[in-house]
Amino acid sequence: MRLRSLLFVPADRPERFAKAAASGADAVILDLEDSVALAAKPVARAAVADYLAGPRPVPVLVRINPLSGGMAGADLAAVLQHRPDGIMLPKAEGAASVAALVALMGEAAVPVLPIASETPAAIFQLGSYGSVAYHVMGLTWGAEDLSAAVGATTAREADGSYTPPYELVRSLTLFGAHAAGLAAIDTVFPALRDEAGLAAYVARARRDGFTGMMALHPAQVPVINAGFTPTEPDIARARAIIAAFAAAPEAGVLMLDGQMVDAPHLAQARRIVAGLD
């Protein structure tokens, strides 16, 4: 499953589901958690179940409520009968949380996308997901719940960048995902009208090694998709590196267009080309 862009939709707004699916997002996340008021959750579950029962133009994930909150069981009972393409798990605290969710799903288990950074305890489990990687489709993170949990006044600097504690969490999520062989999904960009800021945020995420990003609005999707899609020069360079090493299989280091390339460059080139399939 390609996961450049994952678009959130409140689960109690079924009139938005089709528009989200037509946005160009690689996947849609129907949200039963934060965007749905407590009183609206039964109606939201029914709306998600109805949508999942029909045709799906794109993969559909469902963000359930946290395992510790007493509502996850009802969420799963409503949606698993229609086999969503994944379950997003908020407040995940490492491999144990994934294992608990998989056990709760039983024979109806589908892949899990943990939000892996929303509690202080979760930060110390970011390296544990390799043991449950078979059940996990990627790792993502967020700063808002975590900053609230520790009493921070904000997680961001005045220019919108993250403060040092949350930059650390972002980095640990990135490395935890890659250590487990999983997609690394960056968090949302909340300034919906700032297209230039979004483009810069996406470029930074791709530069740093994230493979996709979550979106809050359909208008963000084209920018995210473009940012996580290799350019023609990127592809040409990658193919040239692969061809150069194929022509000199015994070489550890080569010169290509006046620049040294070695094993890490070859690995990155192969990732670029593999992602085109």
Image: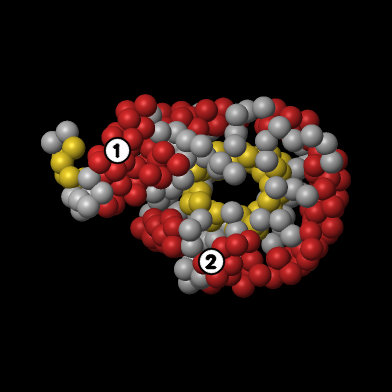
Q: Residues within 10 Å of mark 1 (few under 14, many from 20)?
A: few
Residue nearest the observer in this picture, 143 or 84: 84
Disc number for residue 1: none
Give the residue pinned by disc 1.
243
Q: Is residue 153 left or right of residue 88?
A: left
Count of all numbered marks drawn on residues in the image: 2
Q: Residue at x 46, y 45 (%)?
A: 211
CB contact under 8 Å: marks 1 and 2: no
In percent of width and height, residue 56 lies at 74, 35
Is 238 placed above or below 65 here?
above
Disc number for residue 129: 2
Q: Is residue 24 left or right of residue 74?
A: left
Q: Label 1 amino acid?
A: Ala
In percent of width and height, residue 4 lies at 52, 40
In percent of width and height, residue 277 lies at 51, 37
The reply to whether residue 272 is in sight is yes
